[in-house]
Image: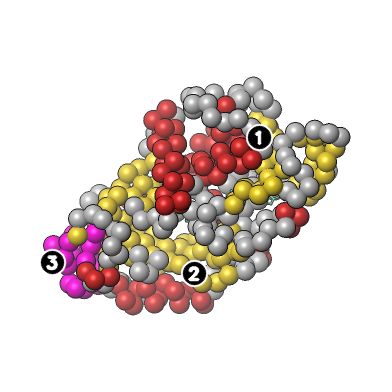
Amino acid sequence: MMTAQRYLERFPNKRVLLVEKEYLGAGATVKSGVLASDLVETPELRTWSDESQAYYELIQFTTIRDIYQPLSAYYLYESADRVPNGHTGDQMAGGQFIHKLPSWLARNTGMVAVTGKARYINPQDLITHFARCFARNKSIKVLEQTTVEHIEPFGNDLHLVKAGKELFYANAIAVCTGPWPFDSFGMKGLRNKRIVSFIIDEVPVSSDRVLYFPEEGAFLLPQEDKNQWLLSVTSTQWDVSADDVFDFRSDDWALAFRFANKYLSLEHGAIQPGNVFCDAYSPNKIPVIKHHPTMKRVVYAGGGSGRGVRLAPVIALEALKALDIEVEAPLNKYT
Ligand SMILES: Cc1cc2nc3c(=O)[nH]c(=O)nc-3n(C[C@H](O)[C@H](O)[C@H](O)COP(=O)(O)OP(=O)(O)OC[C@H]3O[C@@H](n4cnc5c(N)ncnc54)[C@H](O)[C@@H]3O)c2cc1C
């Protein structure tokens, strides 16, 4: 969606076909929490993240209001000596902030909080925004419930795409199939990892902050509009098959309960299943843009590594560049 969007911003009159085997956003995207945080592991990821956030801020300003929300955050560490050197921000000892945490958070006064910012996008709102833009734009045709099965070269400049019962010709193709890449790209190093989130049945208030637990790879996001909190924990299950991402497993619950036993003080039944799916992870967590081994104007773009929506604006731009599409022009208001 983002690749089509960014292409149309640059070339509003060119024709785009978006083929989706289910419905727009049906894969990992609709399941995601979509948060940008102050903590980014490497300078390279920082660049991807900052440029993507700048794009989201711009479209927030020009078109989608209220989707991209700034939030305040506490980054919570077990003790002061666990705060990494690179993590700057105001540091507070337990006594200074514990009373500001939700009452169902276990009181550990040894804890240290580093204050910071986060930005949130509601994935459903983002998908709806794209769907509306595409519906208004005659240059793009969206084909849902249609699976791309085969792509082959056709003459010098074109490719033949077989999708369901239909055949299409395309000059350039971005394959954005999410966690399960096309085998034909000979992808090395990309692996699927499960991602799970849970719902905490507690009502947030407007002063609540996002609570990150960097040592645990977990966060708690207040969702005021839904009267609930979202708990995201890091799963360690790799190489997930497409059949195995629809139900919560005992391992998933074990992750939630381990976190809850350490940090939360909740009534029985307060933790409910949220979302389960998976994402393609690259070894350095940088998204992957890869040319097809024989078709130079066919690229795979993905490997979101748990950040694919947050980084989508730059993933899309890099995919277009790899297709030799000049995309440097400034962003136009979406047509
Ligand atoms: C629970 C959870 C929480 C997450 N939280 C965050 C977060 O907070 N922030 C963040 O940035 N990221 C988060 N992520 C990761 C993020 O969702 C992914 O990185 C991102 O959505 C990947 O986008 P994508 O377009 O590559 O894949 P997808 O969203 O999976 O889209 C791929 C699409 O391709 C379609 N498709 C596949 N094969 C074919 C075919 N042959 N023909 C036609 N269509 C096909 C699929 O139906 C799907 O709709 C989270 C993921 C999960 C599961």
Q: Which mark is residue 95?
A: 3
Identity, as a three-letter code, of the amino acid under mark 3: Gly
The reply to whether residue 315 is in sight is yes
Query: Label 1 to label 2, Cα distance in Å?
Result: 37 Å
Quarter in which the N terminus is drawn: top right
Q: Which mark is residue 274?
A: none
Residue at image coords 42%, 63%: 232
Q: Earlier in the sequence, mark 3 or mark 1?
A: 3
Name the foreground residue: 197 vs 213: 213
Q: Residues within 10 Å of mark 1 (few under 14, many from 20)?
A: few
Q: Where is residue 294 drawn, in percent x and y? A: 78, 47
7 in magenta: no
Query: Label 2 to label 3, Cα distance in Å?
Result: 32 Å
- Looking at the image, residue 297 sits to the left or right of residue 110; the answer is right
Q: Where is residue 4 drawn, in percent x and y? A: 61, 36
Q: Earlier in the sequence, mark 1 or mark 2?
A: 2
Asked whether disc 2 touches disc 3, contact meaning CB atoms under 8 Å apart, the reply is: no
The reply to whether residue 277 is in sight is no
Q: Residues within 10 Å of mark 2 (few under 14, many from 20)?
A: some
**Image vertical order of residue 85 relative to residue 258, above or below:** above
Q: Secondary structure at mark 3?
A: helix
Q: Tag count in the figure?
A: 3
Q: Which residues are magenta?
A: 92-114
Q: Secondary structure at mark 1?
A: loop
Residue at image coords 64%, 40%: 322
Q: Earlier in the sequence, mark 2 or mark 3?
A: 3
Query: Label 3 to label 1, Cα distance in Å?
Result: 56 Å
Farthest residue to the right: give it: 155
The residue at which mark 2 appears reads as: 235
Farthest residue to the left: give it: 95
Identity, as a three-letter code, of the amino acid under mark 2: Ser
The residue at which mark 1 appears reads as: 324
